[in-house]
Amino acid sequence: MEQKVITPMAKGLVIGLIMIVISTVISLMDKNSNSTLQWLAYLVFIVGIIWAITSYGKQLNYNATFGNYFAHGFKISAIVTILMIIFLIIFMMLFPDFKEKAMAIARTDMASKNYSAEDTERGIEIANKFFTPLLIGGALLTYLILGCIASLIGAAITKKNPRPLDEYNEIGQ
């Protein structure tokens, strides 16, 4: 009996929801500046896509090509990216102090790098003005690039045994 193929939408929703829970817990723990915990959601994202591609291959009895596997993984990463951007927008509306905390961290970082007070204020002013578009654009690029890398890895490590069409009596059989 052939296994049912789980759609990229379903896998993307599961991975995205896990990442949202992790991100929310880290934010509520007030651990945003802890770089080790920040990477946990990205790790779940990468491992989740690789797992999704390998399970997709197994569901198809490995009758797919590198391109099929990559496309499946990239669809999942696109769904997760959309979910995470929606989450970021909602999170910023629910927790407006997130922006102030980010600006305080940026100010501290700039001070530790010996920027002049004028340069620091100018940088904070620009970051404050473009905070939302920068955050959304950064998330978009980060998730799509990591998704592409994870899809490449998943497609590369998944077994490939595509059967040519001439083995079939009819197309789709």
Image (cartoon, grey):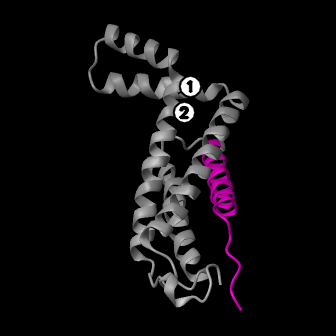
Cβ atoms at labels 2 and 1 below 8 Å apart:
yes
The amino acid on which the numbered mark 2 sits, given as a three-letter code, is Ile
Q: Residue at x 61, y 79 (%)?
A: 171
Local crowd size for mark 1, using a 10 Å CA cut-off: few (<14), some (14–19), many (≥20): some
- Badge 1 marks a residue whose secondary structure is helix
- Magenta residues: mostly which secondary structure? helix
* Residue 111 location (% of width, % of height): 34, 22
The count of marks equals 2
Q: Give percent across and percent down for residue 58.
A: 57, 82
Say if the magenta span includes residue 23.
yes
Rendered location of residue 159, percent (x, y): 44, 82
Q: Quadrant of residue 173?
A: bottom right
- Please identify the quarter of the rendering in which residue 17 is found: bottom right
Q: Against 117, is 87 above or below?
A: below
**Residue that carries the numbered disc 2 in the rendered image:** 136
Q: Is residue 87 above or below residue 73?
A: above
Closer to the camera in the image, 124 or 44: 44
5 with respect to 64 (left or right)? right
Q: Residue at x 63, y 37 (%)?
A: 88
Q: How many C-alpha atoms fall within 10 Å of the one at disc 2: few (<14), some, or many (≥20)?
A: some
What's the residue type where badge 1 is placed? Answer: Thr
Q: Which mark is residue 7?
A: none
Q: Secondary structure at mark 2?
A: helix
- 71 above or below 2? above
Magenta region includes residue 2: yes
Over which residues does the magenta segment extend? 1-27
Which residue was labeled with disc 1? 132
Q: Camera-side residue: 136 or 108? A: 136
